[in-house]
Amino acid sequence: MQARKGDWVVVRGHQVGEPDRKALIIDVHGRDGAPPYVVQWDDGHESTFYPAADAVIERHAAPAPPR
């Protein structure tokens, strides 16, 4: 798994009806975008995160270049 600052990590709910959790990646400590990541969760707390198989990375879209 590779990510960069500004991407989102989404952890899928483990049970029916359990919501997904989402966190903003604010720092990448691994080589070439590899974990661990420092993330800020949707409830506001920060932690160091090592993603498991239930996590996916959502790329942050780069802003369009000016015309």
Image (spheres, helix red, strand yellow):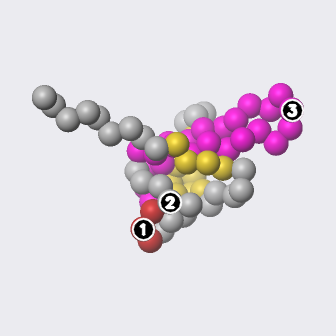
Q: Can residue 45 be seen? A: no
Answer few, some or many: residues within 10 Å of disc 1's Cα (few below 14, many 20 plus, some between 14 and 19). Answer: few
Asked if labels 2 and 1 touch by Cβ distance under 8 angstroms, the answer is yes
How many marks can you see?
3
Distance from disc 1 to disc 2, alpha carbons, whole Å, reads 7 Å
Answer few, some or many: residues within 10 Å of disc 3's Cα (few below 14, many 20 plus, some between 14 and 19). Answer: few
When the figure is inspected, residue 24 is found, relative to residue 47, above or below; the finding is above
Q: Secondary structure at mark 1?
A: helix
Residue under pointer 1: 32
User: Which numbered disc flags the more N-terminal residue, 3 or 1?
Assistant: 3
Q: Secondary structure at mark 2?
A: loop
Per the rendering, the mark at residue 2 is 2
Image location of residue 55, percent across then percent down? 66, 50
Answer few, some or many: residues within 10 Å of disc 2's Cα (few below 14, many 20 plus, some between 14 and 19). Answer: some
**Magenta-drawn segment:** 6-28
When the figure is inspected, residue 22 is found, relative to residue 32, above or below; the finding is above
User: Which numbered disc flags the more N-terminal residue, 1 or 2?
Assistant: 2
Q: Can residue 39 be seen? A: yes
Name which residue lies at 61% across and 48% down: 56
